[in-house]
Amino acid sequence: SQTIHQWPATLVQPVGSPLSLECTVEGTSNPNLYWYRQAAGRGLQLLFYSVGIGQISSEVPQNLSASRPQDRQFILSSKKLLLSDSGFYLCAWSLRNRGGSTDTQYFGPGTRLTVL
Amino acid sequence: DAKTTQPTSMDCAEGRAANLPCNHSTISGNEYVYWYRQIHSQGPQYIIHGLKNNETNEMASLIITEDRKSSTLILPHATLRDTAVYYCIVRVNAGGTSYGKLTFGQGTILTVHP
């Protein structure tokens, strides 16, 4: 069966510090990968998605970047954190859709980031 | 993706069925109904999805009306661990190498009490 891991689970960082969040998926190949952010009391916001190694698409302009160095690894980064970067960061995966099949997204446990 | 409307909150007694409604009157013919839930401080958990037929899995049942303008998620025997925010989402499945963005609304806060 497939599993998705995220770490760290919680993180407290000062403003201006760098960030690196990691997500890995096990038990599947060539997944689509996604980074979402959930701010307190608000819905999910898609930040990045990837359909393959080195292929990253950004949904919103921001202080963050994403990379996919391996098929099942997705990294969210920032060079200098802002207060507004605080939130709950979720990684998700789905099967590479081959037309006609569903692409249900499955979420990881999340990383709660607090920027002070 | 079509907009959905859900009640803000609902209560259910432990052991009873929880019936969570969702209205999606502007749903298109190629849009699926998905349900997720989110327990406090955890990632969203996929529950079930359907297009027009009723669906059942080990977690829940999904009843979609014939005109597809509304649906009901049924948890047949609610437990305290089912207390969570339940999200009803309507979306088109992605095809090929494209993606499908999930948009979560406010959802329904389901509280299961002893």
Image: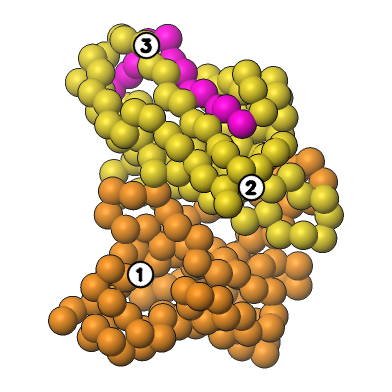
Magenta stretch: give its range.
A72-83
Which residue is painted at 55% across and 76% down in the image? Answer: B57
Residue A7 seen anywhere in this rendered image of the structure: yes
Q: Which chain is disc 2 placed on?
A: A
- What amino acid type is highlighted by mark number 1? Thr
Residue B32: image x %, image y %? 66, 68
Which chain is yellow in the picture?
A
Q: Which mark is residue B108?
A: 1
- Dot 1 surroundings within 10 Å: few (below 14), some, or many (20 or more)? many
Q: Kindly indicate whether the residues beneath marks 1 and 3 are on one polypeptide chain.
A: no
The residue under label 3 is: A18
SS label for mark 2: strand
The residue under label 2 is: A94
Q: Which chain is disc 1 placed on?
A: B
Which chain is orange in the picture?
B
Residue B78 figure quarter: bottom left
Residue A100: image x %, image y %? 82, 60
